[in-house]
Amino acid sequence: MTQPARDLEPSRSARDLYGVELRRQRQLAGLSLDRLSDIVNYSKTHLHGVEAGERLPLPPISEKLDAAFGTGELFQGLWGAVKREYTPRRFDHCLELEARAARIQAFGASIIPGLLQTRAYMRELFLKAEPGRTPHEINRLVATRLGRQEILRRDCPPDFWWILGEAALRQTVGDPTVMRGQLASLLPLVYTGHTTVQVVPFTAGACALMNGTLILLTLPDNSTTVYHEGPWNGEIYDDRETVQRCVREYDRMKACALSPQESAALIEAVMETFEPCESPRT
């Protein structure tokens, strides 16, 4: 029988309380994880993760659990507590999964994704997004994001696939020197044994994912979690329906994108539009 990965402490977090109550209700009903999976139409892996406090019980699973156990709105109420507790930490959870992922796929409509950003590019982003930050705080944010990129240099790195909107190449962040450096850093990663970079050109027209950033994180057990980020916030999804929809849209995006070779040619062409800044004459 599958055991929780860690001891849950209901007094510590709403997520742990949710997991404990799910296990208690399941056992009272005499249901295995396999049987509950059939009833609520969620995978056994997902249900075990919720029970173990390792996955978020995102809607509509709470409604389905209440219906399965006849518990009124018990799990829906617990989800409200989990949501209030967890909202500021959504991207932290994304980073936890990123560190364990076997495959990472990402789409950036108008911004180069974090794992591909140069130091200068990310510094400019932080300066514009966080104008009240001190230089020390900006340095800390940059160091943290650079630390994420160590995953690219592992002996056995994940399989990476990035799709970039053409706007991400052309939107000036910082000065032309910053942009040339950023675009140049993409070229060695366009097509390697573990990295693929494609560009969706403007001529591809509108797409379902063009309003933000999407990250698909697939773990060694083949489960996939979605992180979608808009202008002001991000959401994590790991329910089957949402994941399947996002994977389908991502695959469609691949079909609309240029080949890696054509993408490299476009990146190089855009680089030429960013003339290096001349040093002021004295």
Image (tube, rainbow, N blue to C red):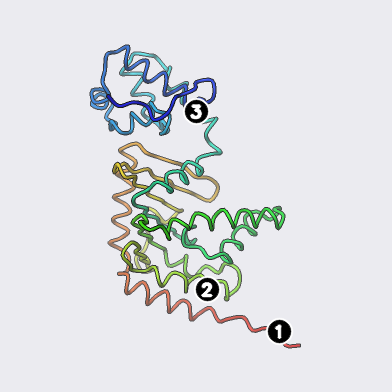
Q: x, y (%) of residue 143?
A: 59, 56
Counting residues from the start of the chain, the first of labels 3 and 1 encountered is: 3
* SS for callout 1: loop
* SS for callout 2: helix
Residue for point 37% across, 77% down: 265
Relative to 183, 5 lies left or right? left
Residue type, numbered disc 1:
Pro
Q: Tell me the crowding category of disc 2: few under 14, some 14 to 19, or many 20 or more residues within 10 angstroms, Cα based.
A: some
Quarter assignment of residue 123 = bottom right
Residue type, numbered disc 3:
Val
Q: x, y (%) of residue 107?
A: 40, 57
Mark 1 vs mark 2: in front: 2
Q: CA distance from mark 3 to mark 2?
A: 42 Å
Residue beneath disc 2: 181
Q: Give the numbered dot on residue 205.
A: none
Quadrant in the picture for the N terminus? top left
Residue for point 38% across, 61% down: 163
Residue for point 57% across, 72% down: 178
Residues at discs 1 and 2 in contact (Cβ within 8 Å): no
Q: Give the numbered dot on residue 280.
A: 1
Q: CA distance from mark 3 to mark 1?
A: 55 Å
Counting residues from the start of the chain, the first of labels 3 and 2 encountered is: 3
Relative to 83, 5 lies left or right? left
Question: In this view, which residue lies farthest toward the top?
Answer: 28
* SS for callout 3: helix
Quarter assignment of residue 200 = bottom left
